[in-house]
């Protein structure tokens, strides 16, 4: 080894190579090279060179996590390189940790999808008592490293990565497994021969829960001194220690997609408890507002916000449905990207299938009537005839009962019809979380984003328990419309010591031929009042 020169060393044959060289593996045995500091740390690791369970020879250290260390190992008899995860010795004495490790092995061994890291074997070394998990060895990088380097991803690439994550989750959820800790550190971008782009691998079902077999988790557990799960990506129900189902994972995927598109998670704070409280109570910012210079169409924004709804019932019902929704917005993403590249701010028009049928029919009728009136007015001006007479003549021509006379003046020029445009409106409320109703149907909760047509005159109704309902006129709504909801008045009960008021004098109306029947109309029962969010302790 040359003194003073940075070197990279082969953990197997101990050969040293200059760092400035381009090679990353040892030319003698193909083992990945490590820097001198890592090599020194590995030399003090007693497991380097050891063989576990008589079949896994540990070659080098790959990384260290909260529950154990991951090594590169060779499986005897198969000459297969594997990633061997070995549980820390100090944790083996904890019964819950050992049970959690076996749960991880059991859950991951059931998963065979190509977007999930494969588990080949697991067990316990009889000589040392080490618990181990043998997985496929991956080459590539964590999504965390990619985000640290680039900040955000191309929108199409972000959607593609998330779709692969959802495919992995679709298999896990179908087998009753909820991941519960989806985050960039658990997403690996693997370089696989035959694939031009990285392949997503979902890692670490280590705190996965087989929810069909286990009961509710009543409180947040701890893992190596950290919160069970990662606060920045927790669903509201996980932050409250409630029972979880697959929709909790979909919330975490929505948070991850928000970060891939905008460059940051929706809720950030140095205090983990504050972040968890925000997941429970606060509405996420609009992705297009968080990253106005990114090609994020309104259709994609709706997908992200739906995945992050506070109530699991309002989210996508399955990973498969979430994935299909992302596939449906790709054309809008391409249009938004093209508009930005040409220097234009894109105007996102919703698909016809997404528009309410009644307003669409009314709008079409209004446009048709306006065009007929315009034709009548122009034709009347061109012929010099009074508007009424000219309109009658056009009506007769339309029915075909009378042949029209040859026009004495040249026909009017073609009328250019300006296409209708839409504008993006975000309706919010103070306090947030109000239900948004339109045409008798619940369409979401505040803040609610939608596209409003130029000739649209509908209204939205905002409802929140304990507050008076409010309406928003779409025709006059601003791009960001915030409505302050007024708390409902509480009628104080009259105490027994109060003196009753004297009844007011009434005058009987004069009798008529047919006496009027008195009808008593009862007011509808008040809606039950409750706090829109559970208290976070």
Image (cartoon, rainbow, N blue to C red):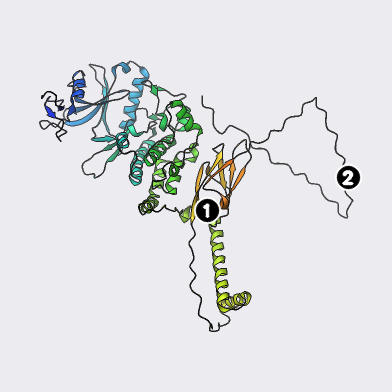
Q: List the residue tagged with mark 2.
A: 507
**Residues at discs 2 and 1 in contact (Cβ within 8 Å):** no
Q: Is residue 43 above or below residue 404?
A: above
Question: Looking at the rendering, which quadrant does residue 400 occupy?
Answer: bottom right
Q: In this rendered view, identify the residue nearer to me: 141 or 202.
A: 141
- Asked if residue 212 can be seen in this view, the reply is no
Q: Quadrant of the N terminus?
A: top left
Q: List the residue tagged with mark 1.
A: 356
**Number of residues whose C-alpha sits closer than 10 Å to that of mark 2, classed few (under 14), some (14–19) or many (20 or more):** few
Circle 2 — which element?
Answer: loop
Mark drawn on residue 43:
none
Which residue is found at the position 42% from the left and 23% from the top?
221
Left or right of 222 in this view: 201? left
Looking at the image, is mark 2 or mark 1 earlier in the sequence?
Answer: 1
Across and down, in percent, residue 407 comes to: 53, 82
Left or right of 377 in this view: 503? right
């Amino acid at each position: 080894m040359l003194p003073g020169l940075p070197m990279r060393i082969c953990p197997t044959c101990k050969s040293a190579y200059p760092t400035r060289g381009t090679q990353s593996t040892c030319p003698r045995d193909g083992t990945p090279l490590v820097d001198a500091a890592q090599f020194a740390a590995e030399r003090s690791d007693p497991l380097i060179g050891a063989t576990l369970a008589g079949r896994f020879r540990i070659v080098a250290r790959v990384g260290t996590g909260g529950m154990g260390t991951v090594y590169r190992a060779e499986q005897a008899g198969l000459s297969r390189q594997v990633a061997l995860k070995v549980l820390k010795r100090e944790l083996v004495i904890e019964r819950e940790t050992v049970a959690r490790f076996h749960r991880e092995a059991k859950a991951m061994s059931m998963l065979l999808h190509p977007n999930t890291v494969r588990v080949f074997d697991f067990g316990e070394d009889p000589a040392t008592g080490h618990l181990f998990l043998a997985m496929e060895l991956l080459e590539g990088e964590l999504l965390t490293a990619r985000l640290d380097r680039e900040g955000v991803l191309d929108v199409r690439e972000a959607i593609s990565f998330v779709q692969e994550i959802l495919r992995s989750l679709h298999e896990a959820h179908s087998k009753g497994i909820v991941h519960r800790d989806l985050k960039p550190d658990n997403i690996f971008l693997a370089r696989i021969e035959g694939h031009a782009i990285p392949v997503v691998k979902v890692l670490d079902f280590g705190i996965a829960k087989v929810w069909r077999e286990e009961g509710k988790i009543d409180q947040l557990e701890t893992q190596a001194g950290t919160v069970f799960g990662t606060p920045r990506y927790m669903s509201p129900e996980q932050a409250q220690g409630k029972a979880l189902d697959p929709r909790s994972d979909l919330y975490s995927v929505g948070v991850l997609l928000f970060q891939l598109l905008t460059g940051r998670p929706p809720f950030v704070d140095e205090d983990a408890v504050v972040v968890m409280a925000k997941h429970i109570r606060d509405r996420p910012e609009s992705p297009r507002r968080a990253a106005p210079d990114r090609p994020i169409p309104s259709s994609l924004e709706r997908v992200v916000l739906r995945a992050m709804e506070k109530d699991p019932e309002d989210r996508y019902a399955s990973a498969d449905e979430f994935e299909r929704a992302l596939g449906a917005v790709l054309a809008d993403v391409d249009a938004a990207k093209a508009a930005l590249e040409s220097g234009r701010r894109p105007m996102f028009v919703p698909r016809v299938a997404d528009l309410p049928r009644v307003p669409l029919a009314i709008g079409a009728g209004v446009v048709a009537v306006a065009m007929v009136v315009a034709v009548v007015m122009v034709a009347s001006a061109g012929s010099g005839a009074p508007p009424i007479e000219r309109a009658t003549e056009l009506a007769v021509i339309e029915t075909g009962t009378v042949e029209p006379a040859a026009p004495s003046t040249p026909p009017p020029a073609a009328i250019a019809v300006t296409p209708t445009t839409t504008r993006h409106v975000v309706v919010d409320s103070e306090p947030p979380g109000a239900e948004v109703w339109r045409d008798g149907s619940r369409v979401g909760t505040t803040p609610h984003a939608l596209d409003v047509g130029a000739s649209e005159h509908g209204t939205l109704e905002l409802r929140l328990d304990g507050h008076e309902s409010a309406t928003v006129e779409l025709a006059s709504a601003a791009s960001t419309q915030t409505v302050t909801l007024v708390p409902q008045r509480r009628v104080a009960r009259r105490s027994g010591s109060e003196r009753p008021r004297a009844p007011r004098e009434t005058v009987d109306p004069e009798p008529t031929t047919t006496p009027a029947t008195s009808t008593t109309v009862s007011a509808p029962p008040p809606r039950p009042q409750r706090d829109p969010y559970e208290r976070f302790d």
